[in-house]
Image (cartoon, rainbow, N blue to C red):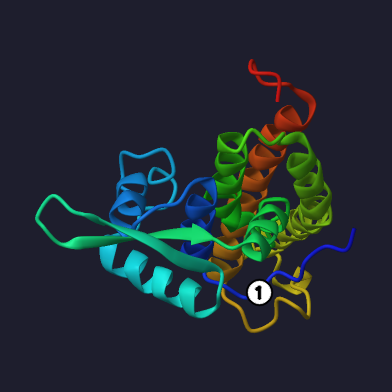
């Protein structure tokens, strides 16, 4: 079966759409789910105004439709939205798509794993796909860390002639700082890969 083409939406749009995919919801219900103390809100917190703007955008794209209204606690009507069949397939495709940058593992990837669990979808496939996507990035960071380690040695005042062309024009502090940043990125990605390896090879207590 051909994979549906995933449209360009903001991360908040996808989160809102995924929550409507779970069940018909109004904006206030989504806002509760995205409070800091909520399961998804712990990963991505969104206040009510952006949520209502997102719902309006999703409705204009025909990804959700208004199906009912209910009276709110303060008397105002709340519009309940339902996901369209086509958007349901888009959400499933998005939930299986690896993130593109290691920094997104702390937000988008965690959110996708949680949302898959909430839909009773297995998470091993996504974990495997993410490992494959991150592996060449990890290899590149390891090579860069090795190079930065060598450059850090050659920046000592006693050996100025060992500086490389790539390092020409940069101060010792700049070279050392660049090495620290590379090392932090490397260790962060290594930690992420360890977690993904565990998720890819371990079944959770509920059998997923």
Residue 67 vs residue 201: left or right?
A: left
Residue located at (66% from left, 74% from top): 7
Q: Position of residue 92 (x, y in %)?
A: 69, 53
Above or below, 38 relative to 61: above
> Based on the displayed image, in which of its 4 quarters is residue 91 positioned?
bottom right
Q: Position of residue 202 (x, y in %)?
A: 74, 22
Q: Position of residue 42 (x, y in %)?
A: 39, 43
Outermost residue, left side:
74
Question: 32 or 190, which is in the foreground?
Answer: 32
Dot 1: within a 10 Å radius of its alpha carbon, few (fewer than 14), some, or many (20 or more) residues?
few
Residue located at (74% from left, 44% from top): 126
Residue located at (49% from left, 80% from top): 60
Residue located at (59% from left, 63% from top): 84
> Based on the displayed image, in which of its 4 quarters is residue 145 positioned?
bottom right
Q: In the rendered view of the protein, which quadrant contains the N terminus?
A: bottom right
Q: Position of residue 97 (x, y in %)?
A: 73, 56
Question: 194 or 16, which is in the foreground?
Answer: 16
Residue 90 vs residue 129: left or right?
A: left
Q: In the rendered view of the protein, which quadrant contains the C terminus?
A: top right
Above or below, 171 relative to 88: below
> Based on the displayed image, in which of its 4 quarters is residue 14 positioned?
bottom right
Question: 182 or 47, which is in the foreground?
Answer: 47
Q: Which residue is mark 1?
A: 7
Q: Secondary structure at mark 1?
A: loop
């Amino acid at each position: 079966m051909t994979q549906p083409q995933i449209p360009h939406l903001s991360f908040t749009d996808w989160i809102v759409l995924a929550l409507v995919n779970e069940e018909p919801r109004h904006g206030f219900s989504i806002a509760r789910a995205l409070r800091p103390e909520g399961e998804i809100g712990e990963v991505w917190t969104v206040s009510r105004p952006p949520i209502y703007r997102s719902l309006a955008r999703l409705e204009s794209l025909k990804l959700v439709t208004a199906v009912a209204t209910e009276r709110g606690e303060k008397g105002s009507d709340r519009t309940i939205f339902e996901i369209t069949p086509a958007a349901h397939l888009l959400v499933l495709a998005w939930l299986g798509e690896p993130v593109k940058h290691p920094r997104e593992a702390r937000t988008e990837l965690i959110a996708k794993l949680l949302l898959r669990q909430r839909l009773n979808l297995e998470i091993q496939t996504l974990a495997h796909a993410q490992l494959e996507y991150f592996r060449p990035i990890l290899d590149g960071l390891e090579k860069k860390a090795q190079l930065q380690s060598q450059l850090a040695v050659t920046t000592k005042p006693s050996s100025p002639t060992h500086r490389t062309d790539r390092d020409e024009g940069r101060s010792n502090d700049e070279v050392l700082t660049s090495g620290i940043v590379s090392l932090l990125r490397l260790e962060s990605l290594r930690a992420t890969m360890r977690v993904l390896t565990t998720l890819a090879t371990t079944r959770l207590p509920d059998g997923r």
